[in-house]
Image: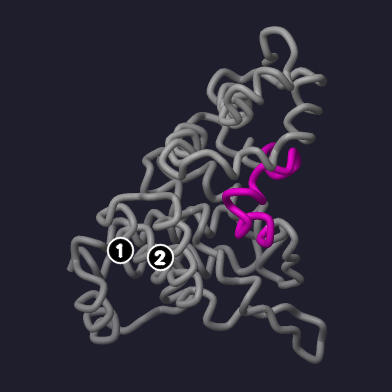
Amino acid sequence: IRCVGEPTERFTEDALRMMRAVRFAAQLGFTIEDATRQAICDMAQNLSKISAERIQVELVKMLTSDRPDLLRDAYELGITKVFLPEFDRMMEQPQNNPYHKYNVGVHSMEAVKVIEPTTVCRWAALLHDVGKPECHTVDENGIDHFYGHNEKGAEIARKVLRRLRFDNETTDLVCKMVLWHDYGLGEMLKKTTFRKALSRMGADFFPYYIKIRRADMAAQRDYKLEERRNSIEHLEKLYQE
């Protein structure tokens, strides 16, 4: 992917073209030409002048493409820090924890890759752990913990989606997926306990919970994998009953 003529001139005419370069690479399976990449690095800050609505359109197209993980390219090129600084924080937050093998940002992108390519599901997967940097603690054994990150994450996700001018329905559903994504992790819940939770989340929402739970698990280490799979299957059985 390269600009026609001089990249700096093209990006001066319309800074959104920097995002389009990454989006085209994601949609078409191309790479970005070196001079164009350098111009994006040099001029990334110009994206601050672009409306949130136009940014949102490009992000949605990128995330629902076959290569949504190229959002990492946007991070490396310095453009996400302009309109999605929360993702930069995620990319800089390690997870020294038995369940994880990636930092928060890479883990989230791995979840994005395996969930179905709808706007709601891809954004929920991207933001499901957005609260972790603010909830990070380390215990006496040097293990990282992120207590309460789902509640904090839902709060941050709402701010992100409103800033990017998403509609209320999409915003509400994504935030709900973020809030519930780690419910019942590894537990064999009793039917009465699950019934109470189902009444709170809403029976119609449960399929979305399963989608984000499975995507999250697929992006983790194999530690206690069988136990977590059994937990999900148990909840699905209770739901059907």
**In the rendered structure, which segment of residues is drawn in magenta?**
73-90
Q: Residues within 10 Å of mark 1 (few under 14, many from 20)?
A: some
Query: Which residue is located at x 30 percent, y 61 percent?
Result: 172
Residue 66, horizontal then vertical, whole percent: 52, 29
Q: Quadrant of the C terminus?
A: bottom left
Q: Which residue is mark 2?
A: 232
Q: Give percent across and percent down for residue 227.
A: 52, 70
Quadrant position of residue 193:
bottom left
Q: In the image, is 237 to the left or to the right of 116?
A: left
| Overall secondary structure of the magenta section | helix
C-alpha gap between disc 1 and disc 2: 6 Å
Label 1 element class: helix
Q: Nearer the viewer, residue 170 or 10?
A: 10
Q: Quadrant of residue 145?
A: bottom right
Do the residues bearing badges 1 and 2 touch, measured as CB atoms within 8 Å?
yes
- The residue at 66%/25% (across/down) is 12
Q: Tell me the tag on residue 236.
A: 1
